[in-house]
Image (cartoon, rainbow, N blue to C red):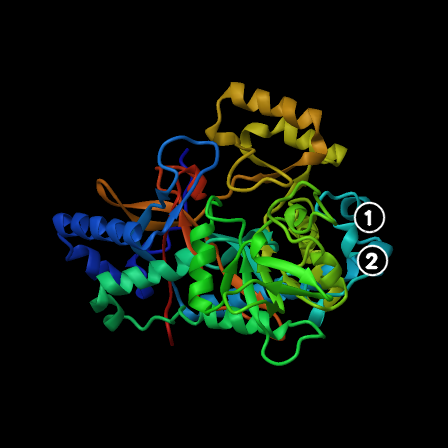
Amino acid sequence: METAFFNEMFDGNGVRPHYAKLGDWTRDMPAQWRQMKQAEAESLFRRIGITFAVYGEGGDPDRLIPFDMFPRVFTQAEWRRLERGIKQRAKALNAFLVDVYGRGEIIRAGRIPGRMIYGNEAYEKAMAGFVPPKGVFSHIVGIDLVRTGPNDFFVLEDNCRTPSGVSYMLENREIMMRMFPALFRENRIEPVEAYPGLLRRTLASVAPQRCEGEPTVAILTPGHFNSAYYEHSFLADMMGVELVEAPDLFVEGGFVWMRTTEGPKKVDVIYRRIDDSFLDPLCFRPDSMLGVPGLMDVYRSGGVTIASAPGAGVSDDKAVYTFVPEMIRFYLGEEPILQNVPTWQCSKPDDLGYVLDNLAELVVKEVHGSGGYGMLVGPKSTKAEVAAFAERIKADPDNYIAQPTLSLSTCPSFVEEGIAPRHVDLRPYCLVGEKIELVPGGLTRVALREGSLVVNSSQGGGVKDTWVLAE
């Protein structure tokens, strides 16, 4: 029996009202013109340099991410609810981080096991007892959402370290506006181009105590071999800040300095796009060539702010994720607006037994996995693949969680045959500083392979523009 998926554009009566103008648009679009526009979009992506790399693969190291020209649409009412839920979650996650690097009240209260935090590989002991400026650990929170019905949205996972993809959100919109200006005249769509300005304002708002005057912000990148390097340079350009690598920075006199043609310039806020372990070879991995020696000493003494803070990843661990609703109740005294996906923790004997008995029906993920790697989609796997994955789980149950195979919503997408439904998710980007803000929309990722539920670009997924209709 085939599963019924919620179609975001069509219901039993035809096209949903907020998609009506897109229905007219596609109906009047000749196939040849659509193919021409698709080629134009790919040419623009290539010319601008919007590419990504997949590590460990041969072929083109700078691959185009597939772009679907059919936009995804949310009503204002749908977005308002999502926005409230996203802000609530980002606030609770930051309260949790301040707590577990401080007194650990949520652990003392028995709401979450201490071993899950203090034994977690993402927990950075170097941050214990330290409160970052304004009490913010995670400044850019990317929350992955899936939809299963008209009013049913679930949080799939939280990304509190260095969530990527926001450049695609901005460039998708830019290219759509360039290629289809009439669409934007006919539809009142909330803008997203304020994001770089909001990001810069957020970063400036968490400048360290010893900052004097207007804060100097810089983006720290591992370099052009990184898969997200395009995004690093794009954001630096859009914000009007410097893009730096480790050799461009040095520590002296309790501050971080940037080498410039006019001499050293003090840096107050570093938006880092490198992992914790590479940030400072004197504090973390001594073999790191990507970090700045002495950076953590300056950070802890109030000479610089690191965004997001080292150790923020302990809050987006896929096992810790199961406790986020409890964090919202504990720190905010509120009920969660957005629900988690039901999750089994293989570290628990009863959960492990259930997962192994029902593996062919579940999605299983590594606790620290990302990018669609290290996971099993039971219904899409062979008996041999399920059996092999079962052995991996038995060998290290603490490393896995499992979730039901959700009936992800579909959105029309342009495929070779014309228009067909494809599964989608959504990653809005929540900025946390003196205020909690986000632009109306986010990155919609689409599983372009028929029947696939995996939307990650590394696994063949694409991206599309996300519209929030103005009132």
Q: Residue furthest bottom?
A: 213
Quarter where residue 94 is shown: bottom right
Q: Which residue type carries mark 2?
A: Gly
Residue 104, numbered circle: 2
Q: Residue furthest top?
A: 384
Where residue 54 appears, x then y in whole percent? 45, 38
Callout 1 secondary element: helix
Count of numbered circles in the view:
2
Residue 359, numbered circle: none
Quarter where residue 69 is shown: bottom left
| Residue 453 visible to an observer of this rendering | no
Sequence-wise, which precedes: disc 2 or disc 1? 2
Q: Is residue 236 left or right of residue 34?
A: right
Callout 2 secondary element: loop
Which residue occupies 28% across, 61% down? Answer: 176
Q: Residues within 10 Å of mark 1 (few under 14, many from 20)?
A: some
Q: Are marks 2 and 1 in contact (CB under 8 Å)?
A: yes
Which of the image's four quarters has the N terminus? top left
Q: Which residue type carries mark 1?
A: Gly
Q: Is residue 463 left or right of residue 211?
A: left
Which residue occupies 46% across, 54% down? Answer: 165
Which residue occupies 79% across, 43% down? Answer: 119
Q: CA distance from mark 2 to mark 1?
A: 9 Å
Where residue 235 appears, x then y in whole percent? 46, 62
Q: Nearer the viewer, residue 318 or 205?
A: 205
Where residue 350 appears, x then y in whole percent? 74, 34
Residue at mark 1:
114
Q: Nearer the viewer, residue 271 or 322?
A: 271
| Residue 99 visible to an observer of this rendering | yes
